[in-house]
Amino acid sequence: MNLTNIKYIFLKELRSYFNSAIAYIVIVGFLAILGWFFTTNLFLMNMSSLRVVFEITPFLLLFFGPLITMRLLSEEMKTGTLELLMTKPIREHEIVIGKFLSAWALFFFTLLPTISYYITVALLGRLDLGPVIGGYLGLMFVGGVFISVSMLGSSLSENQITSAIVSFIIVFGLFMLDKVLYVVPPYLATVLEYMSIDYHFSNIARGVIDTRDLIYYLSMISFSLMLGSFALQRKRW
């Protein structure tokens, strides 16, 4: 793995986000929706808590992931720039990882202004820092999984809309797994619960950093990126 190639792809895509309107539209839209829920919870319901932030953000990520990744590989395949890129001494997995990191960084910059919510709540009352750190760490991992899965979706089609729909279906399935446990047999419920992204996020959001949750997130990200790389290899040959 050539880190220089990954860094080149990462910086190129990150500049592409911020040199266009995409990054600003995504950030403003994301913060507007999240801010509405936060201020409603704070001023109308008199609840000085970040709980609503950690509950709503995974739901917003269902749309955020597919939207910011749908063009990353699909557009390059459709315009032929991917073939041009592959004529250079760069491997498929380096392209996928570099693009994934740029989208993940965009999510980080989108989430960063919500630190003001923490400051607001901390000024109004006592706030336990452990669950806050765990919550934000969990959101970054949830974002990483949704974005990596959406990268896989982007590698499957030259059509951006098709890629976004495929990505949404997969991440929605992961999001819903722990919500259908009561209708499946007990032996299957255990498997589905472990596969559910929301189950692991709820553990971390309580401020409990369990290695099993970290392994789950890192495995999901690695597996999705690996499948995305294989999909690119098949198109190359």
Image (tube, rainbow, N blue to C red):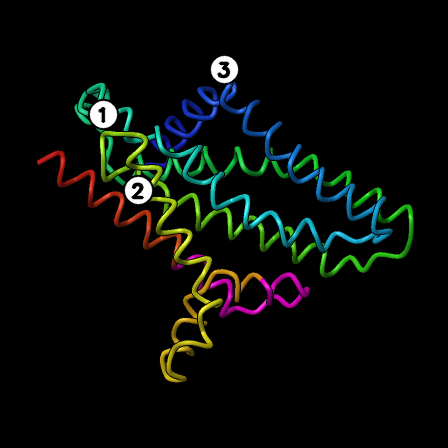
Measure the C-alpha gap from mark 1 to mark 2.
16 Å
Q: Which secondary structure lies at badge 1?
A: helix
Q: Percent x, y for residue 187?
A: 37, 84
Q: Percent x, y for residue 169?
A: 35, 49
Outermost right residue: 124
User: Which of the labelled discs sits on residue 91, or is there none?
Assistant: none
Measure the C-alpha gap from mark 3 to mark 2.
24 Å
Question: Observer-nearest residue: 178 or 155?
Answer: 178
Outermost left residue: 237
**Quadrant (top left/top right/bottom left/bottom right) for the N terminus:** top left
Q: Residues within 10 Å of mark 1 (few under 14, many from 20)?
A: some
Q: Which residue is mark 3?
A: 19
Q: Which residue is mark 1?
A: 82
Q: Look at the image and give the residue range highlighted in magenta.
A: 202-219
Give, as a three-letter code, the residue at label 3: Asn
Q: Is residue 132 left or right of residue 110?
A: right
Q: Is residue 111 above or below residue 49?
A: above
Q: Is residue 171 above or below residue 211?
A: above
Question: Observer-nearest residue: 87 or 77?
Answer: 77
Instruction: Look at discs 1 and 2 and give the one toward the viewer.
Output: 2
Tag 3 near tag 1, CB within 8 Å: no
Which numbered disc flags the more N-terminal residue, 3 or 1? 3
